[in-house]
Image: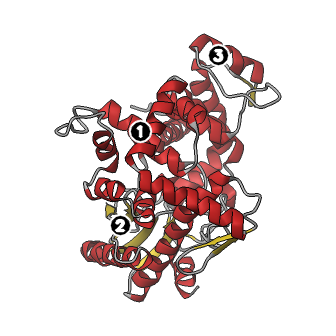
């Protein structure tokens, strides 16, 4: 909790000038966003998303869409996010809907010193993760807003995350030698495809990229308990292909599946699960087996990140925020490389402690003033919004935008 307090005190540096422009112009920006993006869809009436128009667009685009038991289209953001991965044409519409529905810029908690601060709400999630307010925390809303993160003059920030953390945790806890070897290769998803015989031993991401993506999606889906029908939808492949991929996972990682089944059996028999440090999950008798299978990866990931934040903070690092399987740190520009090295060492040590000597790799992305933080998933939306602001300012100033 001392480390959490230090992170809450540090906060995340924000480009306040741009935030104020967004707040001032968000209403007009929304109208312009709808006008520009909906030109390709014609699913809005004013600011209202019309179900029947969306159904008509799906028919024109020949996109099958998940439905609820009632027969109505499933319009949850999770479904939109999943379908946007399968059908890129859905992505702009998903970003637009998410921003219109959930974005409350005035709720974003930014103090007079330009730092975003909010209570991290430690241990709130069932897995023991922090659960800060989505509207007050900069990492809560749509990803394009993360470009508001900007280090002040003379400073830099670094986003450091665990690589394939959940895959690594599953490999170590299950003691599956094939899965451990796949992680040790540096690209567990390519290794999985090779182990399953779908890619030759000399294959690479460049030569077999599409096949690697199939096996990557399968490997991640398994950790969340996804079954053939859901995997087929995510892959945009026939169900028989999804079944073959899941069968390949079962055959390649037999020890993992024995361990995973044992986890479910233990939870159903005893009514609880717990991590290496004792964080418990109670009431497992009637729990969904998928959530039971996933608990150990998520909860041990939470333990790992929590310990990493403690170690980095105790070593003098300014940790601005924990973000699921990553941390954001800040330091003077001439000290950021050292700060990154210290933080990565702390994260490596944390993984070794949680996983009994097994180290999870990390990678770092550094942003130095005057650059701003970027997330590739939100770059297009950020560019559109900032262009709209420039155009509005140009009209007010009576000049043209290049």
Q: Nearer the viewer, residue 227 or 343?
A: 227
Q: Nearer the viewer, residue 319 or 209?
A: 209
Q: Residue furthest left?
A: 202
- As measured in the structure, the alpha-carbon distance from the residue carrying label 2 to the one carrying label 3 is 44 Å
Total tally of numbered discs in the picture: 3
Instruction: Please tell me how crowded label 1 is: few (under 14), some (14-19), or many (20+) other residues with Cα within 10 Å.
Output: many
Q: Nearer the viewer, residue 248 or 111?
A: 248
Give residue 104's position: percent from left, percent from top. 69, 52
Residue at the location (63% across, 66% down)? 266
Residue at the location (44% across, 35% down)? 245
Disc sitting over residue 64 in the figure: none
Residue 114 in sight: no
Q: Residue furthest top?
A: 60
Give residue 386's position: percent from left, percent from top. 49, 42
> Which is more foreground, mark 2 or mark 3?
2
Residue at the location (66% across, 32% down)? 31
> Which is more foreground, mark 2 or mark 1?
1
Which residue is under mark 2? 360
**Viewport quadrant of the C terminus:** top left
Which residue is under mark 1? 248
Which residue is under mark 3? 57
Task: Say which label, 3 or 1, has the lower sequence index.
Answer: 3
> Which is more foreground, mark 3 or mark 1?
1
Q: Secondary structure at mark 2?
A: loop
Residue at the location (39% across, 77% down)? 356
Q: Secondary structure at mark 3?
A: helix
Determine whether, in the image, residue 109 is placed left or right of residue 257: right
Task: Say which label, 2 or 1, has the lower sequence index.
Answer: 1
**Viewport quadrant of the N terminus:** bottom right
- As measured in the structure, the alpha-carbon distance from the residue carrying label 3 to the one carrying label 1 is 36 Å
């Amino acid at each position: 909790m001392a480390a959490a307090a230090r992170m809450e005190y540090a906060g995340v540096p924000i480009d306040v000038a741009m935030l104020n422009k967004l707040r001032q112009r968000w209403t007009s920006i929304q109208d312009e966003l709808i006008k520009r993006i909906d030109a390709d869809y014609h699913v809005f009436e004013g600011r209202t998303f019309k179900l029947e128009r969306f159904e008509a667009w799906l028919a024109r685009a020949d996109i099958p869409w998940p439905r609820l038991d009632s027969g109505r289209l499933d319009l949850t953001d999770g479904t939109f996010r999943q379908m946007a991965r399968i059908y890129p044409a859905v992505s702009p519409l998903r970003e637009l809907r998410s921003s219109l529905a959930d974005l409350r810029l005035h709720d974003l908690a930014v103090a007079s010193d330009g730092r975003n601060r909010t209570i991290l709400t430690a241990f709130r999630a069932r897995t023991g993760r922090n659960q800060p307010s989505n509207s007050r925390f900069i990492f809560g809303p749509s990803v394009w807003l993360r470009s508001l993160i900007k280090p002040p003059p003379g400073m830099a920030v670094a986003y450091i995350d665990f690589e394939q953390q959940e895959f690594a945790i599953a490999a170590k806890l299950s003691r599956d030698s094939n899965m451990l070897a796949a992680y040790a290769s540096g690209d567990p998803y390519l290794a999985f495809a090779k182990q399953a015989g779908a890619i030759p031993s000399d294959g690479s991401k460049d030569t077999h990229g599409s096949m690697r993506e199939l096996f990557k999606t399968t490997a991640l889906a398994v950790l969340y308990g996804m079954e053939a029908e859901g995997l087929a939808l995510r892959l945009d492949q026939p169900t028989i292909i999804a079944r073959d991929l899941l069968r390949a996972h079962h055959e390649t990682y037999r020890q993992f599946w024995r361990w995973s089944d044992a986890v479910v059996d233990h939870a159903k028999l005893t009514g609880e699960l717990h991590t290496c440090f004792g964080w418990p999950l109670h009431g497992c008798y009637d729990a969904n087996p998928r959530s039971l299978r996933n608990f150990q990866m998520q909860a041990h990931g939470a333990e790992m990140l929590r310990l990493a934040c403690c170690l980095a903070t105790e070593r003098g690092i300014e940790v601005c925020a924990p973000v699921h399987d990553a941390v954001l740190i800040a330091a003077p520009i001439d000290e950021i490389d050292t700060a990154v090295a210290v933080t990565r060492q702390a994260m490596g040590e944390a993984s070794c402690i949680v996983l009994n000597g097994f180290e999870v790799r990390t990678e770092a992305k550094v942003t130095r003033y005057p650059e701003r933080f970027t997330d590739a998933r939100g770059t297009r939306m950020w560019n559109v919004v900032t262009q709209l602001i420039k155009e509005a300012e140009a009209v007010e100033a009576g000049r043209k935008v290049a």
